[in-house]
Amino acid sequence: MVLDRESQDSDSSSSSEDSGDEDTDFSVGQEQPESSSHEESSDDESEGEMETENAPSGWNSKNGKIIWSPTNLETLRYVPAPTNITPGPTHYAAARIRDPASSFSLFLTDEIVQLTVDMTNLHGRRSVADWREMDCDEFRAYVGLLILAGVYRSKNESSLSLWGEKYGRDIFRATMSHKRFHQIGGALRFDDKLSRPRRREDKLTAFRKVWDMWTYHLELLFNPDRDICIDEQLVPYRGRCRFKQYIPSKPAKYGLKIWAVCNVKTSYAWRLQVYTGKAGDRAEVNQGMRVALELTEGLQGNVVTCDNFFTSFALGEELLRRKIALVGTIRKNKTELPPQLLQTRRRAIFSSVFAFTLTHTIVSYVPRRGKNVLLMSTKHRTPGVSEGQKRKPVIIQDYNRCKGGVDNLDKVVGTYSCRRRTNRWPVALFHNLLDVSLYNSFVLWTTIDPAWKQPKKYRRRLYIEEVAEALIKPHISKRGRLPRSSSAADVVTDAQSAAAGPAAGPAPGPAPGPAPIPKTKCRKQCQLCTDKRRRVVSTCCKCKKPACKDHCLSICSLCFK
């Protein structure tokens, strides 16, 4: 009987141990199933109470300040706040856009043009010996030529070949001479250099006025949708600059870094901020959080998507106070993460582990063996997983859908980029200003007039060509000297006749407007040369045959009679 009692005690103890192991397998926060038998001993009840008291209440973070739960039973439901704005072009933009040229002029405003013309003329009078004053029409024509060079994919092509008679294009020679184009590009300035010592504390002082005026209109003309994206943009530049950055993951690697907020649906650049380096000798702490808060200032009800440079637990909390949700990847060295999410051993491929707080959700997804991806979201509050083969979490699907706003902007801007090689960083920023303005104005125009050139798949190229033509035409119509090339001369003549046509009445007589430009004489071969015929312009006064200087005689009018 004693042996039987001991065996019964061992069986009961083993069963209680097995039940304890089964209890630890349940996720924390779930309701545990009630026991079927109510006839338990008081000792077993006391042991069960001790086990529940010793059971962990969640996963502690590395810093011990945050407790994560494997279930979302205590997580609050996400209710998006209203944005209080209508997405798309604002009423200010819709009332002023009539054609593609007027859409682009909302970004390259008359104030920016006038400031650039004044500062360029000021520098030209100081440094260029034979400087000729530039007006606003000539500056717009200069910008139009830069845009056309981008349309023709000639950003790396020599400007001399663009003006060449054999392989060049007539529109460049018809607008201005190659010498004048280089003269304007060399004297292009955006501030008074002599007044910079008073503004030495600002590293962007050489371009600050133009930049502030331009970025103000970016926000004025467009309201973003609910989904926005924050990322960095690198303007290619390898010259001397105090805040030049090296980013090996970018195609250009060296350049000027710009923090950008883009609309996910259209990739419209809504807010931009140039990174001018660290303020003091020490590196900035929580730089990603500061930049994200500054770029989203004034917004409400939006969902921000960003990469692991910006994402943190503190950023998610601060954005929630502003009624903004956050979705982004998070680095594995963050101290607010629990160690349980970092483990990849013995985890199945395409498996997901979730962790929750009241307002935050973190998922650890294993796309392949030995690697996991961590994402944090304040928008998703449930452990949602897709039904596909890879069983991706819903957080990852939303992140993949919204993460490419700024990257797509870089792609479309680089397709028809007007940037040229330069040693001055303000000019590099000005070229990027033109590229972004062209794309943003295209978004505004196609949103207001969706049927414009709808059947064609290269609408953006047609739009850029139309904008460049509108910028060039006023200067061509005022040109007083005909270019040497006959084809370029025909372009000037046609433009001037078109500009003077509406002003001319039905009455006979010379039409008002610019004086007609005489046609240039064509070169012909000398009729008297035998071995090598020269191409000359001079002709005989009697037979009208072309003759070179070796077969011509100089005679006065008295002897000729």
Image: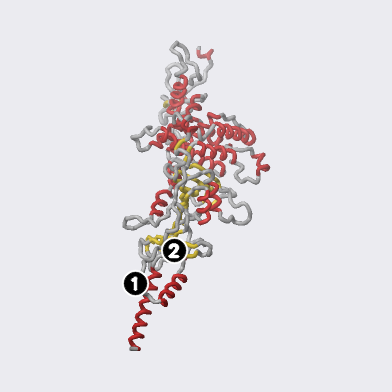
- Residue 524 is drawn in which quadrant? top left
Q: Earlier in the sequence, mark 1 or mark 2?
A: 1
Q: CA distance from mark 1 to mark 2?
A: 37 Å
Query: In this orientation, does residue 531 appear?
Result: yes
The image's colour scheme reads secondary structure
Q: Is residue 289 above or below residue 466?
A: below
Give me the residue at 53% from left, 65% from top.
Answer: 64
Give me the residue at 51% from left, 65% from top.
Answer: 62
- Residue 522 is drawn in which quadrant? top left
Q: Is residue 406 above or below residue 345?
A: above
Residue 341 is situated, as x and y percent measured from the top left of the image, at 44, 63
Number of residues whose C-alpha sits closer than 10 Å to that of mark 2, classed few (under 14), some (14–19) or many (20 or more): many
Amino acid type shown at disc 2: Leu
Residue 362 is situated, as x and y percent measured from the top left of the image, at 44, 58
Residue 184 is situated, as x and y percent measured from the top left of the image, at 56, 35
Relative to the observer, which residue lies in front, 117 or 437?
437
Relative to the observer, which residue lies in front, 76 or 466?
76
Amino acid type shown at disc 1: Ser
Residue 208 is situated, as x and y percent measured from the top left of the image, at 59, 41
Residue most extreme to the right: 198
Residue 174 shown left or right of residue 212 in the figure: left
Relative to the observer, which residue lies in front, 154 or 70?
70
Q: Which residue is mark 1?
A: 37
Q: Secondary structure at mark 1?
A: loop
Q: Which residue is mark 2?
A: 341
Answer yes or no: do the residues labelled 1 and 2 have beta carbons within 8 Å?
no
Q: Is residue 212 above or below residue 559?
A: below
